[in-house]
Amino acid sequence: MRIVLELLKENILNNVKNIHDRVKKPIIAVVKANAYGMGSVEVSSVLERSPYVKSFAVACLEEAIELREAGIKKPILVLGGMLGQECSKELIHYNITPVVSSLYQFDILKDKNIDFHVKIDTGMGRLGFFELLEDIKNHPNLKGIMTHLASPL
């Protein structure tokens, strides 16, 4: 027996509306890992039409570039941050926002005109700052703060 997953565009849009109706906040659609195997370009192209989806989140810069090259216009957040100096040119060219989770990454971005989010470690012990440093907290390009919860609320 063959198992098939069928995604219906209108159902995806209806689900996003239902989520928005409950939380009353804009949604960041996480489409990392090929939208968890469902096709990041295909799913993002559908979600791009939703007024409730304000932006997308992906795992790495390559995934973000793939979405931009497929015509996705809404903001894209790279959850895995960026790895080196060479990434800053691509971040600017493709208008992609990285998540900064180390001083090394912050040092690369601090003198560039690149918006970024910061990851705070709230117990996972993997990535992120334990506290926001003054230089980061007061940086004009800091646009958001995020975490990965270590346990459910």
Image: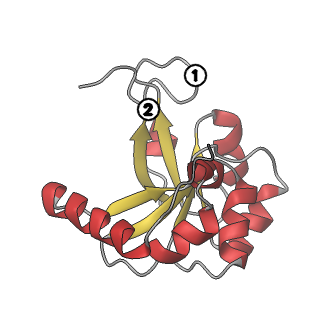
Q: Position of residue 41 (x, y in %)?
A: 63, 69
User: Is there a contact, CB below 8 Å, between mark 1 and mark 2?
Assistant: yes
Q: Quadrant of residue 25?
A: bottom left
Farthest front residue in view: 1
Residue 96 in view (yes/no): no
Q: Position of residue 100 (x, y in %)?
A: 59, 43
Pointer 1 or 2: first along the chain: 1
Asked whether 11 or 107 is in front, the reply is 11
The disc labelled 1 sits on which kind of residue? Arg
Asked whether 11 or 85 is in front, the reply is 11
Q: Quadrant of residue 49?
A: bottom left
Q: Position of residue 89 (x, y in %)?
A: 79, 66
Which residue is found at the position 64% from the left and 82% from the top?
71
Which residue is found at the position 62% from the left and 61% from the top?
39
The disc placed on residue 107 is none
The disc placed on residue 148 is 2
Q: CA distance from mark 1 to mark 2?
A: 9 Å
How many numbered marks, from 0 up? 2
Instruction: Note whether 79 is above or below 89 in the view shown.
Output: above
Count residues near mark 1 (Cα–Cα under 10 Å), then give few for <14, some for 14-19, many for 20+: few
Residue designated by label 1:
126
